[in-house]
């Protein structure tokens, strides 16, 4: 039976190091990347660089929510969705069309953004398109897949017990060769092999993925506000579209209650509690009560790295 080594490539440091390890072990592997439509342009450019560095193509897959959106439209028109007012329905029908941007279409279909508590984005935007478009055709042909994943145990609590190797079933195996690695070792692998890390790591980003990720921390938000106003403007527009497509007519990209100044009596609306409020909060110190002068005077062109890459 044919064995396929398929590596999920996000353009981040861990998936790159996984690929470097495969090269060092002289493994024949393929790379696949799930395009969420919500990556920074420099990550898309970096994927092109990786293709030339590794000398092989990265297969790009995308989720498509046009059917789900069409179904939601039909149900709205037929009045089959409970709790919708006529005004909310009419507004939703004006914006509820597929855009071809997977992240935005997923949120318009769901009528909300994902969050750290409801992280449906990974499943719908990354896991399922790769399984459906890449893995299933091979498994249906009775081939074996080793799915190489750049997962490290020290990344997060949820990954603390990640297994290095596991059988999923049906010929699919997960292989996570970096489970015991830390971030220093990951960047050391880049240095040793001569691969440039994603440039966003020198622009204040602790992680590379969606821009921004729903799990972004305050420092990352601060860096995004300083360096990437176009991405902030895009998210602001997405908040409007997703809000108009939602029953409540409001949805914020970040959970508004994460803001330290939020009180339980605040009425949450995307116009007052959206990305701009979180950006404003990211530029504060002392629990959000004081303007952070040091952050505000930072140079947007300067090198900043949580991993000591600027030294
Ligand atoms: S990078 Fe963040 S926002 Fe993007 S799919 Fe993953 S968890 Fe969701």
Image: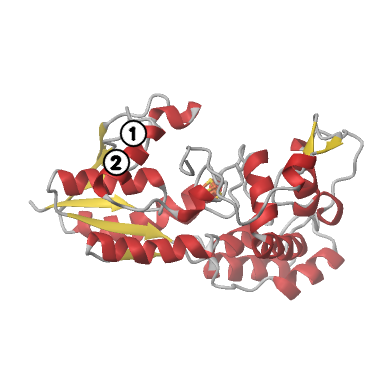
Q: Which residue is mark 1?
A: 185
Does mark 1's beta carbon lie closer than 8 Å to ligand 1? no
The 10 Å Cα crowd at callout 1, few under 14, some 14 to 19, many 20 or more, is some
Q: Nearer the viewer, residue 15 or 306?
A: 306
- Position of 231 with respect to 282 (left or right) is left
Name the colouring of the figure.
secondary structure
Q: Is residue 185 left or right of residue 92?
A: left
| Neighbours of disc 2 within 10 Å: few (<14), some (14-19), many (20+) | some
In percent of width and height, residue 278 lies at: 76, 46
**Residue 101 disc label:** none
The residue tagged 2 is: 189
Query: Is residue 234 among the parts visible in the rendering?
Result: yes
Disc 1 element: helix
x and y, in percent, of residue 205 in the image: 55, 46
Find numbered disc 2 in the image and state the secondary structure of the residue it sits on. Answer: helix
Q: How many marks?
A: 2
Name the image quarter holding residue 111.
Answer: bottom right
Q: Is residue 171 among the parts visible in the rendering?
A: no
- Percent across and percent down for residue 199 are 47, 55
Residue 152 position (above or below residue 79): above
> Among all residues in the image, which is located at the extreme right?
265
What is the x, y in percent for residue 14?
A: 37, 43
Q: Residue at x 62, y 61 (%)?
A: 109
Query: Is residue 117 shown above or below 94?
Result: above
- Identify the residue at horizontal 80%, vertical 71% (top origin): 90
Whether residues under marks 1 and 2 lie with C-beta atoms below 8 angstroms apart, the answer is: yes
Residue 14, compared with residue 109, is above or below; it is above
What's the residue at 53%, 42% (across, down)?
305
Task: Using residue 116 as the reference point, say whether residue 284 is left or right of it.
Answer: right
Tell me the distance, in whole angstroms, between the alpha carbons under discs 1 and 2. 6 Å
């Amino acid at each position: 039976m044919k064995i396929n080594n398929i590596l999920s490539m996000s353009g981040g440091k861990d998936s790159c190091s996984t690929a470097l390890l495969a090269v060092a072990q002289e493994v024949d592997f393929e790379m696949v990347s799930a395009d969420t439509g919500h990556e920074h342009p420099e990550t898309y450019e970096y994927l092109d660089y990786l293709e030339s560095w590794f000398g092989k193509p990265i297969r790009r897959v995308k989720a498509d929510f046009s059917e789900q959106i069409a179904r939601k439209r039909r149900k709205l028109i037929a009045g089959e969705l409970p709790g919708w007012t006529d005004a909310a329905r009419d507004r939703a029908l004006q914006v509820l069309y597929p855009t071809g941007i997977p992240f935005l279409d997923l949120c318009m279909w769901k009528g909300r953004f994902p969050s750290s508590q409801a992280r449906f984005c990974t499943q719908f935007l990354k896991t399922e398109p790769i399984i459906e478009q890449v893995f299933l055709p091979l498994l249906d042909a009775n081939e074996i897949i080793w799915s190489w994943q750049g997962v490290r145990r020290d990344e997060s609590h949820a990954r603390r017990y990640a297994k290095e190797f596991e059988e999923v079933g049906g010929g699919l195996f997960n292989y996570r060769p970096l489970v015991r690695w830390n971030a220093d070792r990951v960047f050391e692998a880049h240095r040793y092999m001569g691969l440039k890390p994603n440039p966003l790591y020198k622009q204040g980003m602790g992680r590379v993925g969606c821009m921004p990720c729903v799990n972004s921390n305050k420092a990352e938000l601060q860096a995004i506000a300083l360096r990437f106003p176009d991405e902030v403007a895009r998210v602001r527009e997405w908040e409007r579209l997703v809000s108009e497509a939602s029953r409540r007519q409001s949805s914020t990209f970040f959970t508004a209650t994460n803001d330290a100044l939020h009180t339980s009596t605040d009425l949450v609306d995307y116009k007052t509690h959206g990305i701009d409020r979180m950006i404003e909060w990211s530029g504060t110190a002392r629990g959000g009560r004081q303007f952070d002068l040091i952050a505000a005077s930072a140079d947007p062109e300067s090198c900043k790295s949580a991993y000591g890459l600027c030294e």
